[in-house]
Image: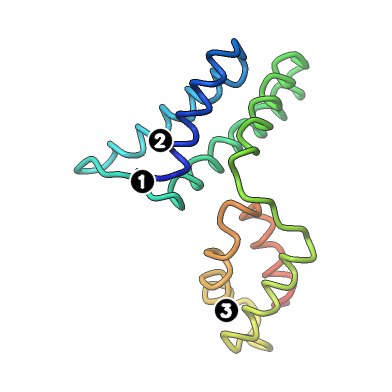
Amino acid sequence: MSDLKDRLRADLTTAMKARDELRSSTLRMVLTALTNAEVSGKEARELSDDEVVGVLASEAKKRREAATAFDDGGRPEMAAKERAEADVLADYLPAPLTEDEVHDLVAAAIAQVGAAGEGMKAMGRVMGVVTPQVKGRADGAFVAAEVRRQLA
């Protein structure tokens, strides 16, 4: 079993004992999402720590998008709840990359694949190198925009 999943379960128990409703409901939700990911597909399997981080990142992104939607819809109390849940999930995610770090990773990937001067037709190769390095640590849309900018 993955260490991160064990940590999530232990923290859920601690949150329940402390009667921390926000943390316990958020951890229950994420553990349910992990179980769903494990049983999806043709056969059940155990998720690795990297796959657990991927599910956590996906759930955190859902919370950020929901908070924005609630803000746009005039529901600040629901937006605040979604942001609080995203903050709980952020405790389990690796530290996000800064814009400068993403810029440097993209530049290194362009040099690695020899894509300098090739333009947009090299985007797939560059993204193939960068994506595993930033998984769970940077927004994919931002990374793609940076690759486009540097290739142009």
Q: Are marks 1 and 2 in contact (CB under 8 Å)?
A: yes
Residue 70 figure quarter: top right
Mark in the foreground, 2 or 3: 2
Q: Amino acid at mark 2?
A: Leu
Q: Badges 2 and 3: C-beta atoms under 8 Å apart?
A: no
Q: Nearer the viewer, mark 1 or mark 3?
A: 1
Residue at figure coordinates x 59%, y 10% from the top left? 19
Q: Secondary structure at mark 1?
A: loop
Quadrant holding the N terminus: top left
Residue under label 2, please give it: 34
Q: Disc 1 or 3, which lies upstream in sequence?
A: 1
Label 3: how many Cα within 10 Å (few below 14, some 14–19, many 20+)? few
Q: Nearer the viewer, residue 108 or 117?
A: 108
Where is residue 10 shown, x and y percent of the image?
A: 48, 29
Q: Amino acid at mark 3?
A: Lys
The one of 102 and 27 positioned closer to us in this rendering: 27
* Mark 2 secondary-structure assignment: helix
